[in-house]
Amino acid sequence: MCNNIHGKYDLRSVIFCATVRMQTTLTKCSPHQEKRNRQRLRLSISIMWTHLIAGVLLVSMPKDTSGQDVGDLFRPNQLLTEAQGATTGEKVQKVDKPSYTLAVENKVFVSGFWSNEVYEVSSDSSIKVFAKGNGLDGPWGLAVREGILFVASFATDFIHRYDINTGAFLGAFGGEYELDCPEGMAVNNDGTVLYVASFLQDAVVAYTPEGDYLGVLIASHLKGPEDVAVLPNGDVLVTSHYSDTVVRCTPQGVYLGTFAAVAAPVGITVGFDGHVYVAAYKDNAVARYHGTTGAFVDYFAARGHLVGPSSVSFGSAQILFVSSYDNDKICMYNSTSRTSLFLPSRNAHTNIRWT
């Protein structure tokens, strides 16, 4: 594979390809181990670049269609959760590479990609491990339907099912003959179909909520599909990371064209205002697009503590939660006032309690 995974810079791609080719040439490993190696390489390369670019600005500020600097639109720098003397320590490090965030009523679920755990943040700000084990390896996408939380296990090609209230593991479905590194997911409007972005398969795969395989929804015009969202009319939107586009298709999989152009899109969701919000990984921003036409509206959030955003999700209080993958944070934005706060991870002082 000669494309980088979630890489911001071309050199990452070169290093990644060279390493994978070396492994392929010198060693023979199982499909599971090969996926695990890709997972480890993703994190290693990310850490390498964090050190290399420290103190050096390599990425220019992205521009919108009018040429206005995204930094002038909104800088999320107000840290409302910061508190003196708050609890810190080893447990705070559990959120390591938060790949995906899903707000469900008064709770927020977070996938810890490198820790192989899913966390539950309650309304009182307490945080606990919701799911781990049972083969969960590299958790990414999250979706919910009628009390069932679906978790995509990136490295094993399975979708895990959990009771959202108790955390009980209810089994898994998928596998390497149906999926290849599953990431983001979404349930259709009537709750009868679960769409899964199969990253290395360049396809979106459909299942029933019970895990029955329905086939490939769409496989054309996708290069590294990352996440899925469903519009009010039932059309499906897919972020295509390597083609810098959001692709639109019907519920039957009929390709309807490019919905929007985005720099290395990853996460996607439909907001309370009817607009579509996309995590633009390369721009360190959340871009907003008209929910019907796909026309660019603005950069809802950019830079500040937002580094390598990988998912977006609205809570019941119209708060937008954004996984900031590259600096291990969950950023939260008030969709009305645009004030911001964040759930930090390592070396951060906060009033959040871990249980």
Image (cartoon, rainbow, N blue to C red):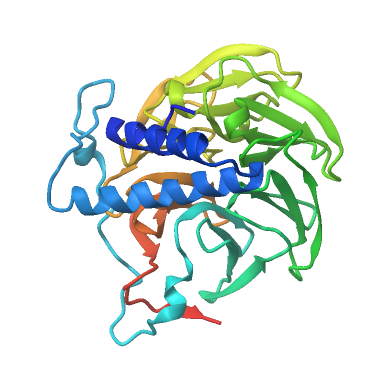
Can residue 217 be seen in this snapshot? yes
Give left or right: position of 233 versus 214.
left
Give left or right: position of 38 versus 75.
right
The quadrant in which residue 187 appears is: top right
Q: Between residues 211 and 339, which one lies in front from this camera angle?
A: 211
The quadrant in which residue 185 appears is: top right
The quadrant in which residue 186 appears is: top right
User: How many numbered marks, from 0 up?
Assistant: 0
**Extreme front residue here?**
26
**Extreme bottom residue here?**
85
**Extreme left residue here?**
56
Q: Between residues 335 and 217, which one lies in front from this camera angle?
A: 217
Q: Assign the C terminus to one quadrant of the image.
A: bottom right
Query: Eyeballing the image, is 307 above or below 340?
Result: above
- At a point 51% along the width and 47% down the height, the residue shown is 37
Query: Eyeballing the image, is 60 above or below 112?
Result: above
The percent position of residue 268, horizontal first and vertical second, equals 52, 37
- At a point 33% along the width and 68% down the height, the residue shown is 80
Can residue 338 be seen in this snapshot? no
- At a point 24% along the width and 27% down the height, the residue shown is 63
Q: Between residues 97 and 165, which one lies in front from this camera angle?
A: 97
- At a point 44% along the width and 27% down the height, the residue shown is 2
The percent position of residue 150, horizontal first and vertical second, equals 71, 51
The percent position of residue 96, horizontal first and vertical second, equals 45, 62
Query: Eyeballing the image, is 26 above or below 78?
Result: above
Query: Eyeballing the image, is 96 above or below 21?
Result: below
The percent position of residue 201, horizontal first and vertical second, equals 63, 28
